[in-house]
Amino acid sequence: MATSLSVSRLISSSAISVAKPLLSPTSAFTAPISFSRSLAPNLSLKPHPRRASISAVRSFSTTTISASISVGDKLPDSTLSYLDPATNDVKTVTVSSLTAGKKTILFAVPGAFTPTCSQKHVPGFVSKAGELRSKGVDVIACVSVNDAFVMEAWRKDLGISDEVMLLSDGNGEFTGKLGVELDLRDKPVGLGVRSRRYAILAEDGVVKVLNLEEGGAFTYSSAEDMLKAL
């Protein structure tokens, strides 16, 4: 009762100075309850720490890496190219012919000759090619948004023979259909629009495993990760 009385006196003594500037003449003053609640000695206006932590977790959990392709989908058909080392001619291959009736691993890199791609990602698949094939993999191919001439120069530089195919998605057609574009136009190196790093295991063209990285990160798209999935 003592608390209620002091609040009422406070409201009534300040009604003239506070209410007139804030309310129109026709408005009814109906806020005593909310005023008394806001002045209640036990009510804290500080954010509840537990509630804040829950919302932070929810915010983090809803951040997902998205793409147009997902497990269970049929790979979109597209034409990729490569340089025939025997004739030095540019040849093409379709994704459908590369995957039809086969167990295929397609992995992508942001760019030929870039550090992680050259030192870890591609060499990992080269060294594990025998183990992957022993588990039934028919085709292992690396895809990059580079032209066929750059991909051939990269193949020679890495000393790759037939362990891994290096395929050019020069116009980013296949990358765009998968929805995995990586926009690097604002970076100092000026790589333009490339592909996010990923590794896909497809059986007869249907995606069975999709390990898609955030940007160019190299976390779970390695040859070892594909071996674990087989």
Image (cartoon, rainbow, N blue to C red):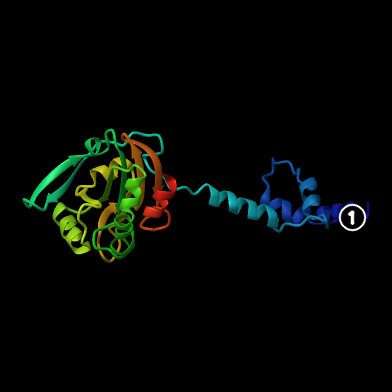
* Label 1: which secondary element: helix
Residue at 18% from the left image edge and 41% from the top image edge: 93
Q: Is residue 189 above or below residue 226?
A: below
Q: Is residue 182 visible?
A: no
Is residue 130 rendered to the left or right of residue 10?
left
Q: Is residue 80 above or below residue 51?
A: above
Is residue 71 rendered to the left or right of residue 17?
left
Residue at 34% from the left image edge and 39% from the top image edge: 202
Q: Is residue 160 visible?
A: yes
Between residue 76 and residue 220, name the one nearer to us. Answer: 220
Residue ranking furthest to the front? 134
Between residue 32 and residue 221, name the one nearer to us. Answer: 221
Residue at 80% from the left image edge and 46% from the top image edge: 33
Whole-percent x and y of residue 13?
Answer: 82, 56
Residue ranking furthest to the left? 87
Instruction: Identify the image quadrant of residue 16.
Output: bottom right
Q: Quadrant of the C terminus?
A: top left
Q: Which residue is under mark 1?
A: 3
Between residue 9 and residue 160, name the one nearer to us. Answer: 160
Whole-percent x and y of residue 32?
Answer: 79, 47
Query: How many numbered callouts?
Result: 1
Question: Mark 1, residues whose alpha carbon is within 10 Å: few (<14), some, or many (≥20)?
Answer: few
Whole-percent x and y of residue 166?
Answer: 22, 52
Whole-percent x and y of residue 205?
Answer: 31, 35
Q: Amino acid at mark 1?
A: Thr
